[in-house]
């Protein structure tokens, strides 16, 4: 049955009826949307679609944390401000922001997670609800915001989007399919812990689309780079739990794709995801046997590859099992005891106020 439930509430897109957003339907009037961007999103077709669709949503605020070179930030900002939105650009690597983080002892590392964290403080201070999503989905629709927000009107504290990743006649979502899922299954075979039940309930744990109450946003300890999604799930488990979490069907997404190799490719991302995931699990009481875990992960990955091969064939999709096995072998090298916890503090314990970030990240307003 397509409407099968997981351990967390799973809300399916079974009809074309928009979700019920409460008596007046204007939860968006108290919602801030956070859309992180880097130079690669400047004037891109996908980012333009996202912002155009958000014009139809008309949320109270849109915060765009931008990481860009000094000579690029002004044209980037001017392009962003051309959209009909209550939009605030936050230059995440502005000199004043870097100075602020150095003074607070928080300058050790940067990336998507740090950028989103910088925006979460101002967003949660401004509104009761916060939605976060990426800017690289060329299939983005305005309805995604209402679908992510709908569970929050039903008493849930956290909602996560899931969707199919099928493009150009093949399966994507490779880091989730070939790293996160088989690693989690290998751990589930050897351990029994509530955190594993929680993390294993998400149909697309590495999706960048989620929504939460401002209270939860204030409590997130964001990893600095690509571990953001997994780190968010760890804190959502601690503060929302199984009963306070929902996942919602966002249909089918088409995203930009990364190469496998290199620090900026999926291989580099797997190291960030592994460090965060294994840290979250250790904090949740799981004690992995790191000596055997890489081999158990490989075995789990190869079993899944045979299932993906069958699914691809069933749907007439191209599938390169050898290339997928090679990816599993590459990702196995990322499995090692987590490094020192370098997550940023929750905004409840931040050494400066959200307004201080907004001032430092908007030097053009001086």
Image (cartoon, rainbow, N blue to C red):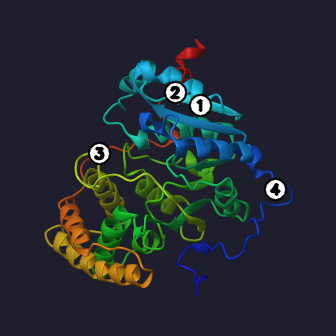
Marks 3/1: CA distance? 25 Å
Marked residue nearer the N-terminal end (1 or 4): 4
Marked residue nearer the N-terminal end (4 or 2): 4
Query: Where does the image place residue 196, in percent across and percent down from the top left?
Result: 39, 72
Does residue 107 appear anywhere in the picture? yes
Q: Is residue 277 left or right of residue 199?
A: left
Q: Residues within 10 Å of mark 3 (few under 14, many from 20)?
A: few
Q: Are the residues flagged by discs 1 and 4 in contact, CB closer than 8 Å?
A: no
Q: Residue furthest top?
A: 366
Residue at mark 3: 264
Q: For residue 139, what is the image quadrant?
A: bottom right
Find residue 25 and name its label. 4
Helix, strand or loop status at disc 1 = helix
Q: Residues within 10 Å of mark 4 (few under 14, many from 20)?
A: few
Marks 3/2: CA distance? 22 Å
Helix, strand or loop status at disc 2 = helix
Q: Residues within 10 Å of mark 1 (few under 14, many from 20)?
A: many
- Residue at image coords 54%, 50%: 133
Helix, strand or loop status at disc 4 = loop
Residue at mark 2: 76
- Counting labels gives 4
Which image quadrant: the C terminus? top right
In the rendered view, tell whether residue 91 sits above or below residue 3. above
- Residue at image coords 36%, 25%: 102
Nearest to the eye among marks 4 and 3: give it. Answer: 3
């Amino acid at each position: 049955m397509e409407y099968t439930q997981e351990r967390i509430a799973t809300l399916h897109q079974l009809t074309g009826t928009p979700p019920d957003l409460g008596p007046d339907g204007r939860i968006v009037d108290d919602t801030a949307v956070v859309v992180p961007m880097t130079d690669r999103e400047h004037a891109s077709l996908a980012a333009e679609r996202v912002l155009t669709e958000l014009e139809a949503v008309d949320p109270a605020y849109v915060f765009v944390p931008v990481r860009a070179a000094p000579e690029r930030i002004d044209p980037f900002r001017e392009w962003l401000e051309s959209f009909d939105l209550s939009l605030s650009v936050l230059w995440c690597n502005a000199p004043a922001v870097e100075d602020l983080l150095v003074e607070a002892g928080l300058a050790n590392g940067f990336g998507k997670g740090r950028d989103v964290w910088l925006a979460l403080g101002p967003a949660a201070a401004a509104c009761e609800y916060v939605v976060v999503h990426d800017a690289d989905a060329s299939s983005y629709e305005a309805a995604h915001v209402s679908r992510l927000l709908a569970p929050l009107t039903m008493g849930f504290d956290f909602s996560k989007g899931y969707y199919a990743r099928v493009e150009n006649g093949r399966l994507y979502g490779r880091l989730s399919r070939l790293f996160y899922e088989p690693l989690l299954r290998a751990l589930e075979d050897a351990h029994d812990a509530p955190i594993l039940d929680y993390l294993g309930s998400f149909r697309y744990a590495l999706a960048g689309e989620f929504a939460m109450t401002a209270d939860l946003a204030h409590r997130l300890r964001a990893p600095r780079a690509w571990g953001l999604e997994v780190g968010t799930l760890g804190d959502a488990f601690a503060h929302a739990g199984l009963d306070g979490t929902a996942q919602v069907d966002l249909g089918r997404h088409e995203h930009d794709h990364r190469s496998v190799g290199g620090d900026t490719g999926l291989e580099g991302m797997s190291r960030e995801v592994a460090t965060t995931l294994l840290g979250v699990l250790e904090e949740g009481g799981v004690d992995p046997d790191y000596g055997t875990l890489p081999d158990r992960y490989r075995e789990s990955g190869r079993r899944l590859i045979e299932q993906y091969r069958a699914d691809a064939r069933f749907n007439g999709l191209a599938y390169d099992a050898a290339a997928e096995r090679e990816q599993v072998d590459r990702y196995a090298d990322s499995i090692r005891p987590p490094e020192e916890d370098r997550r940023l503090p929750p905004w409840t314990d931040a050494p400066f106020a959200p307004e201080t970030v907004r001032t430092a990240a908007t030097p053009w307003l001086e």
